[in-house]
Image: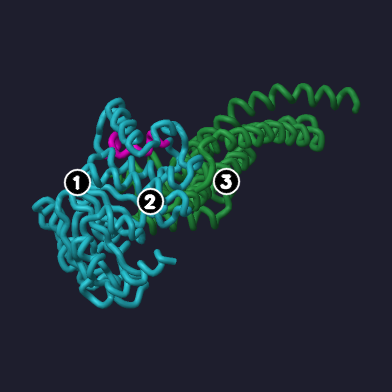
Amino acid sequence: MNERLLKILLDAIPQLIEKFFTMTIPLTILSFSFGLVIAVLVAIAQYAKVKVLREFCRVYIWIIRCTPLMVQLYLVFYGLPNVGIVLDAFPTAVLVFSINEGAYMAESMRGALEAVPSGQLEAGYCAGMRFPAIMWHVILPQAFRTAFPALSNSLISMVKDTSLASVITVTEMFRQAVIINGRVYESLALYTEVALIYLAFCSLLTVLQRFGERKLSAYGGAR
Amino acid sequence: MMLQIRDLHKTFDNHSGEVLKGVSLSVDKGDVTAILGPSGSGKTTLLRCINFLETANAGTMIFEDRKIDMTRAGKSLISFIRKKTAFVFQNYNLFLNQSVLHNVTLGLTSGRKMHRAQAETIAMEALRRVGMAEKALAYPGALSGGQQQRVAIARAIATSPEIIYFDEPTSALDPELIGEVLSVMREIAQDGMTMLVVTHEMEFARHVSNHVVFMEQGVIIESAASEAFFASPKTDRAQAFVRSIMHQHQM
C-alpha cells in the first residue's frame, strides 16, 4: 500500500468515527426505540383482538412492508413539502426508520405474544388481575424473550440501514465517506474502510445478543 | 347458599351440538363437591363457564346473593367475582417468568392492590401450607409437576377465596406425584375451604368430598351426598360408572 493511500485512510478514520457516533448511532438508537414502542403497541392491539384497531394495524404493516424504505424516505423528505409539510433531514430519517422498523418488529412481537401459552393469560385473570397488569408482569416478559433474536436482527439491520439516510442529505458515516471520496477518488479503499467499521460494530452487537440471550434464559427450563 | 348455577347452556362455534345442556347445581359454604363423569361430558366446560373463561349461551348464576346473567356479565362484575374465587388448572399454568413466591404474590399485589411486604408474608404462609416454602425463589421450570401444582394451590389459597375451582388437578401428573397433590387438597378441604373439583380420582371423591355430581353428555345425571352415591347410585348410568371404577380398583 502506498503512502498516499495510507494517509487518506488514516485521515478518514476520525471523520468517519465522528459521524458514526454523532449521527449513525443516535439515528439507530432513536429509531430503534421509537420503532420498538410502535411494535409493542401494534402487537398488543392485535393480540387483544380490538376489532377496529386490529384492522388499522394490519393496514399499517401491509403498506410499510410492501413499499421500499428508500421510497418512503423520498416520499416524506421530497414529497411532503409539496403539501406544505417540511421536515428537517434528521427528524425525517428518525420518523421513517421508526415507522418502517416498527412494522417489522410488530410482526416479531405478535408472533412472540401468540407463542405464550394461552393458559398464562387465563391464570392471570383467575388470579384477579386485569389485562394490562397481566401483559406487563406475565405475557410481555415471556414474549420479549421469544422475540429477542428477531429484535436483535432488526437492530443490526437498522445500524446498516441508516446509511440510506444519506439520500436525504443526512451526513451520517456513509455519506461522510462519499464526501471524502469526492475529494480523493479512492472508492475501493474508502468504502472498504467504512464497511469494516459497520462490520466491527455489528459484530459487537452480535456478541451482546448472545450475552443477552443467556441472561434471559435465567428462568428457563420446561414449559 | 354460596354458589348456585341455573340452567347453564354452552355451545362452541366450531362444535356440532351443545356441550352443556341445561346444568344446574348449588354449592354451600364448606362443601367439597366432586364433579365426576366420562371424558367429553362437559365437566371442564362447566368450570370454565362458571369462572367466565368461556361465555355461556344461557344460564344464571347466584353468587353471594347476587343474581348474574352469565351470558352478559360485564368486565367489572366478572373481575369482582374472580377476586372472590380461585382456579387450579390441569396443567398448572404457573407464570413461567416469575419465581414461585411472585406467582403467589401477583394476585395479591396486582389483583388486590396489597402492599408487597404483606403479600409476601401471606404468600410464604400459603407456600408453607403446601410444603413449598423452601422453593420460594425457584422458577416453575425447575419444579416437578406435583410441585408446580402445589404452588398453584398456594396461589389459590393465598387470596382467601370463597371457593376454589379445581379442573382435573392431578390428570397431568405422573402417578407417583398424584399423592402429594391430593393430600394438600385434603388438608385444605379439612380446613373448611369450599371446593368444586372436576376429578377422576375416585378415592378423593369418595373420602374427601361430601357431595358428588355425576355428569354425562352435558347434563347432570345424578347429584348426591358422596357416601350415598358410592353406596347405592340411583341411576343406571351412575351404577355402571361406579361398577366400572370399582372393577378397575380390584384389578
Residue holding disc 1:
B162
* In the image, residue A52 lies in the stretch drawn in magenta: no
Judge left or right: residue B6 versus residue A19: left
Q: Which color has been applied to chain A in this rendered view?
A: green
The amino acid type, in three-letter code, at marker 3 is: Ala
**Residue A157 relative to residue B162: left or right:** right
State which chain is coloured cyan: B
- Specify the subunit that label 3 lies on: A
Residue furthest out toward the left: B65
Q: Which residues are magenta?
A: B100-111
> How many neighbours does mark 1 have within 10 angstroms: few (below 14), some (14-19), or many (20 or more)?
many
Can residue B209 be seen by looking at this rendering?
yes
Structural distance between the alpha carbons of marks 2 and 1: 34 Å
Q: Is disc 3 in contact with disc 2, using a CB cutoff of under 8 Å? A: no
**Among the 4 quarters of the image, the one containing residue A181:** top right
Marks 2, 1: nearer the viewer: 1
Name the residue tied to disc 2: A45
